[in-house]
Image (cartoon, grey):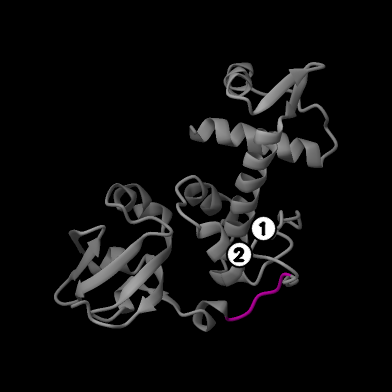
């Protein structure tokens, strides 16, 4: 789905949280596309979710707010909303569940808004607070990873996101470090990529394995 359409679904969700039902003052062309694809019903001068739209919007809002918690609580960034916007639409696989588990199943984002619960949550939850999750969970900069290590990308700096995403390096991707000197040689999806130290300092990863590939 196009990013602009996902943004509209998130906006409808937020308007509903503010008791604006149906959601109004939205792009009519985008709403019509969502209606034709079964995500919304347009009635009473506004938009309502279908079952399909409800689940999709729920997933999008959950992902965005989880990333907000990560950028705020783990990295201490003031621009947590902007950074969440930059990565939420590019996240792949089961990154939502992994991120939620990593963060300890938070209930609220930094703005105090509720985070929809996921299948991974169960009865687990934590109240928002800042602590040393960065080191506790084995998160480190790619520049600090040793040769022969397999890692999963957690976050990349917005400045380098366009370039790295074109190389397949986005949150959730798996990287194997083949060399670290004089520069980093990484294997991404069976493709060798050379990365300089500056960029590697702006990629946060979680170690999966330290064993050399045979």
Q: Residues within 10 Å of mark 2 (few under 14, many from 20)?
A: many
Which mark identifies residue 47? none
Magenta stretch: give its range: 128-132
Disc nearer the start of the sequence (1/2): 2
Q: Residues within 10 Å of mark 1 (few under 14, many from 20)?
A: some
Check residue 130 for magenta coloring.
yes
Of marks 1 and 2, the one in the foreground: 1
Q: Quadrant of residue 208?
A: bottom left
Q: What SS does tag 2 mark?
A: helix
> Image quadrant for the C terminus?
bottom left
Q: Residue at image x 27%, y 51%? A: 167
Q: Residue at image x 85%, y 37%? A: 19
* Towards the viewer: 122 or 27: 122
Could you tell me residue 170's position as x and y percent? Answer: 38, 55
Vertical position of residue 173 compared to residue 133: above or below: above
Query: What is the chief secondary structure element of the magenta stretch?
Result: loop
Vertical position of residue 14 compared to residue 101: above or below: above
* Towards the viewer: 70 or 151: 151
Q: Is residue 106 left or right of residue 201?
A: right
* Towards the viewer: 97 or 10: 97
Could you tell me residue 134's position as x and y percent? Answer: 52, 77
Check residue 10 for magenta coloring.
no
Q: Quadrant of residue 52?
A: top right
Residue extending farthest to the right is 19
Q: What SS does tag 1 mark?
A: loop
Vertical position of residue 120 compared to residue 22: above or below: below
Identify the residue under disc 1: 118
């Amino acid at each position: 789905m196009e990013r602009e359409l996902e943004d509209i679904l998130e906006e409808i969700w937020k308007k509903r949280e503010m008791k604006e039902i149906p959601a109004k003052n939205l792009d009519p062309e985008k709403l019509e596309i969502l209606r034709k694809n079964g995500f919304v019903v347009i009635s009473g001068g506004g938009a309502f979710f279908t079952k399909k739209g409800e689940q999709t919007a729920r997933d999008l809002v959950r992902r965005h707010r989880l990333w907000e918690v990560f950028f705020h609580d783990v990295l201490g960034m003031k621009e947590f909303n902007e950074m969440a916007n930059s990565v939420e639409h590019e996240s792949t696989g089961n990154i939502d569940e992994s991120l939620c588990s990593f963060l300890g199943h938070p209930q609220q984002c930094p703005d105090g808004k509720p985070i929809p619960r996921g299948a991974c949550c169960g009865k687990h939850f934590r109240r928002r607070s800042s602590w040393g999750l960065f080191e506790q969970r084995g998160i480190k900069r790619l520049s600090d990873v040793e040769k022969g290590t397999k890692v999963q990308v957690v976050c990349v700096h917005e400045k380098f996101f366009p370039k790295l995403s074109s190389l397949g390096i986005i949150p959730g991707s798996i990287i194997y470090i083949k060399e670290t000197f004089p520069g980093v040689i990484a294997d991404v999806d069976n493709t060798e990529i050379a990365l300089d130290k500056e960029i590697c300092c702006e990629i946060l990863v979680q170690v999966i394995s330290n064993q050399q590939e045979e």
